[in-house]
Structures are given as C-alpha cells and as structure tokens.
Amino acid sequence: MIHPSLFLRRAIQADAVFSGVSALLLTFAGGALAPWLNLPEALLRETGLFLIAYAALVGWLGTRQSMPKPLVVIVIAGNGSNPVSLCRAMDCFAALAMTAPAGARLKPKRGFPYPACP
C-alpha cells in the first residue's frame, strides 16, 4: 500500500472522470460516432462498456487514503502505453524542437514544462 500525494490522487480522479465521459460517449453514441471514426459500432460500444468498469475502478482508487501499489502501477502503465498519449508526447517534443531558436538551451518553466503543449 502507498499513501498517495494530493497530486497523484487528483490525477487518478481526473483519469476516472475523463474515462467515464469517454465511456458514456462511446457506449451511448457509438452508432453516431462509428461512421465519423470509420470504426465498427460494436467495437466502440464494447470499448465504452470496458471503460465504464475501468472508470469505476479508477474512481474508487482515487478516493482511497492508501492505494494498492499494483493497481496504481497498472493505471499509470495503462495511461503511458496509450498510443494516442505517446503520439501526443512526440508531437509536443517535435513542436518544441521546431519552435526553439537554434542553439537555445531549453529549461523547463514552473508549471507545465513543455510550452509547445498547452
């Protein structure tokens, strides 16, 4: 068991909220999203149903004063292995590299350290 910082607890709670919103959208609007995303409706609905369970688990985890370490590791690894997240991170680094003056030393600023990604 670990005793999470306020930042970790809030990050996990935010993950639960956004996963829940995605779950509801995919589950109940899968038919409308399928042609727009060019994906099968069944895939979107089943993904939404999975995300409902995931959001409930992560929401429960975010309310605990002490969290089981294996569950925290699974949530963090699951978010980090998301291809969309990895692509967004690479885009941010590429945008940062392209907008920085040649030879400039990039130092993280207070707050979000990558100014290319708001």
Image (cartoon, rainbow, N blue to C red):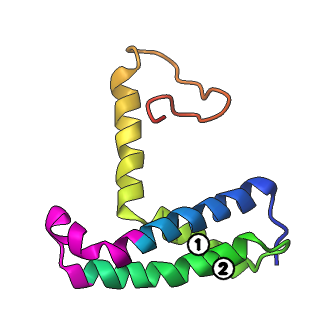
Q: Amino acid at mark 1?
A: Val
Residue that badge 1 annotates = 75
At 41% across and 29% down in the image, what residue appears? 96
Q: Amino acid at mark 2?
A: Leu
- Magenta-span inclusion, residue 32: yes
**Crowd tier of the residue under label 1, counting other residues whose Cα lies within 10 Å: few below 14, some 14–19, many 20 or above:** some
> What span is colored magenta in the figure?
25-42
Gap in angstroms between the C-alphas marked 1 and 2: 6 Å
Assign a secondary structure to mark 2.
helix
| Closest to the observer, 18 or 78 | 18
Residue that badge 2 annotates = 71
**Is there CB contact under 8 Å for labels 1 and 2?**
yes
Question: Is 50 drawn above or below residue 65 in the view shown?
Answer: below
Q: Picture coordinates of residue 89 (x, y %)?
A: 42, 47
How many numbered discs? Answer: 2
**Crowd tier of the residue under label 2, counting other residues whose Cα lies within 10 Å: few below 14, some 14–19, many 20 or above:** some
Q: Picture coordinates of residue 43 (x, y %)?
A: 26, 82
Residue 58 is left or right of residue 101, and the answer is right
At 63% across and 73% down in the image, what residue appears? 73
Residue 61 is left or right of residue 32, and the answer is right
